Image: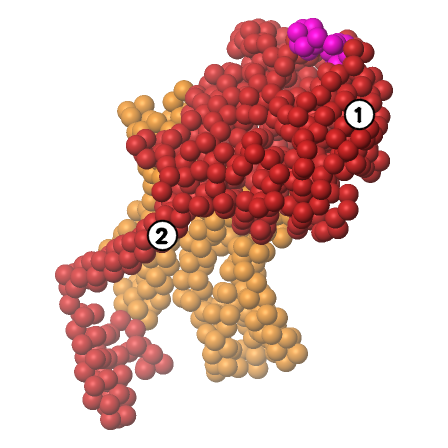
Amino acid sequence: MTASHGAYGNADATTTATSNAASSNGAASTDESLNARVRTSKSPRPNKWGIIIAAVVAIAIIVGAVAIFNGRNAQQSANKADTVTIGLKLAPPSLDIRRQSGSAIEQVLIGNVYEGLVSRDSDNAVQPGLAKSWDISTDGTTYTFHLNRNMTFSNGDALDADDVAWSINQLKEKQYYNANQVESLSKAEALDANTVRITLSSPDSNLLWYLTGRPGLVFDKDATYNAKTQAVGSGPYTVESFDSASKMVLKANPKYWGTAHKPATQHVVIDFITDDNAAVNALKSGDVDVLSPVNATLAKSLDANTYHVSASDGSDKFVLAFNCANKKLADKRVRQAIRYGINHKEIIASRGGVDAALGGPIPSVDPGYEDLTGLYPYDVAKAKQLMREAGYSISKPLKLTLTYANTYGTELGDQLKSQLAAISIDLNINYVEFSTWLQDVHANGDYELSLVDHAESHDFYKWTMPEYYYHYDNKDVQALYAKALAANDEKESDEYLKQAAKTVSEDAPADWLFGYRVTVAYNKGVKGFPDKLSQTVLPLWQISKAE
Amino acid sequence: MSAARVVMRSMWRKASGKYALIVLGLWVLVSLISLVWTPYALLETDGFHAWASPTAAHPLGTDGVGADVLSWLMAGSRTNLAIASLTVVVAGIFGLALVAAMVSRHTALRSTSVVVVDALISIPTVLIALMLSVLFGASTAVIVAACGFAYGLNLARIVRPAAILAARSQYVESAVWSGASGSRVFVRHIMPNVMPVLLVQLSMSAGMSILAEAGLTYLGVGVGVGVPSWGHSLATSVRFISIYPLTVLWPGLIVTMTVIALHLFGDALRDAIDPLTNPELREAA
């Protein structure tokens, strides 16, 4: 007990005891160092500061060395002019474009590795692809495509009308992903080696556009390969390696048949970078030459002399869906009140002021677009009155739950909660994993309010499907959409679509928070990167980099 | 002079103790104030002034939705206070129960409990929290449960030697001979002996729980959405650290200062509460 008493507080007792032990071991140097330590512990502040300064200096040296080392590495990698490195946010889980859902796989593979009968340009318009021209019968149910000559796949196989007809019939038969987009298509047949006829059960003015996507892709009938990890297509590039967790390497296809889309760069590396900060750092260090998309707020830190930063209209719609099958939301007044109660301008401003206001289901890049933002302007008084009529007040608020995926950040939920509180809605936020959202909301339709980015173009048809998670069932809209599809004339079709979109917006089965405008950033040495729609159409063949 | 006042005074006399007492005092005070008043309501957002720099109206600036950072930090301090105190209670009770098992007179219980603690101690706190959040969703209770469990194990492992020493002492032996029950011996004779080590460990657990809250909330398994906490403020602002570094600085600074205060508090309290190191306490008694 007495020994331990000495060990507390009284420093001398401890030191003597230890140095005795050390000297009995015969180690004089240990003794000295112990004495030195005793002095340090007893000496006043200056030495403590010395240690702190030494530590700071050491850290600074390490950080500096790492930074210089990284910088040198970056310069080395950036110097290779025959390789362009592009940073994307989302990676496709596999390369199987016939079965794998998601827009990332379309962005990377369509037009680059696989080609369709027709292609899509950066203005969202239909252009020739494997077919150089086509005729449409007057009743709009027969399409005759005239193919290019001497086309080959990357494995050397010839590409002819048989492959085209087989690919399209397989799509229908096996119900590959997006087969539902061309529901009206009944069959494809090869008339001769360079002509394909497609027959429709009913006219569909969207058919050509949908054929620029997955339904029009042509695969090699005779090739056998593992579609999840390999790709055999006719496009200007082939897949050299693919890892959905990090990157994909594409190489110019030496057997490419065409001349119009000849690759400007031999190698394209696509880095999948999910973290926004990591992405911007990769661009700054030269690990990537292009970022698509880049976070608009973070892009402010990029030097305007070195980097080109631009935002453009796209088809991304942030849809706050109201479950019309829900008892509380079946009341139209409540749905309207929510739309009046949301201050879209404020939400857009807080996100950096880049995004576009959107008042209805059709984005500005799609046919049938019309500015509908005037239908439900921000008007709290009107929203409150509607809520009162529906039987709710500040003392008796309406309780609603918003389910959305955590990939979109907490800010949107916080803002909606805050704005809707003013119109006596008590919003509870259910912030979930994206997979949970897909299961609960998208697949099962079990929700009250949901928020998601519908990135697809030409997706108005979802408002005509009562079984879709919107649970929106309006016979007028369905009839108008059918008319739009059947119309022979583009203008006529657009008119019907406009009417349908306006009817949907007036009915308020959802609120369109904003049209997400994609910001892209790239080093000014990069030429040919599309400023528009790069989230869906990424023509790699036209991208090059100056030495 | 009462013993409590002597303890407080001896803590106050040391610079580290003074720092700890001031910071912890402020913490409790701000938490209480935030119950009735914050400069702005938490739900008051202004998207037109998001990420604003500090001004007279918003002394610490605004966050990504234009809400007042100071108000969120004030309200967050009470969430963190609750997490820290509850973690201390849970870790303390759980840890002491384990210690009791590890020094019990039943050989089988004693040896198995040591093995079990050694095995469980290897599970990281984050993993426990992740698994709990799968079952119960992200909430304050999950943080407290995960931290209480992990730090309780740590505490038991560290307190055990002192407890064994006490259990072998002659006064415990005589208490046992005079017929005292196992639980009475533990509470009356063993616990007071391990108190100094216990207090240091508990105050460290409180500090670690604040760090854990910040980390877990960043991972999305901490406090729920819309619940103010320092971790919440950190997580929402860290995305734009390269553009708006100030918004990360404030919660970071508060977390650092508080965790340091808790660690120093444990040391100072140990020194002040132990009659062996505090001569004044011996005089008072």
The residue that disc 2 covers is A76
Using the numbered discs, state the Cα–Cα distance from disc 1 to disc 2 in whole angstroms: 52 Å
Residue B184 visible within the image: no
> 10 Å neighbourhood of mark 1: few (<14), some, or many (≥20)?
many
> On the picture, is A312 further left or further right than A372?
left
Against B122, is A404 above or below? Answer: above
Residue B138, placed above or below residue A48:
above
| Magenta residues, start to end | A480-497
The quadrant in which the N terminus of chain B is found is bottom left
Q: Is residue A67 left or right of residue A350?
A: left
Q: Nearer the viewer, mark 1 or mark 2?
A: 1
At label 2, the amino acid type is: Gln
For label 1, the SS is strand
Q: Give me the residue at 38% from left, 47% from top.
A: A78
Q: Is residue A238 magenta?
A: no
The label shown at residue A197 is 1
Would you say A352 lies left or right of A389 here? left
Q: Chain of mark 1?
A: A
Q: Nearer the viewer, residue B169 or A344?
A: A344
Tell me which numbered mark, 1 or 2, is placed earlier along the sequence. Answer: 2
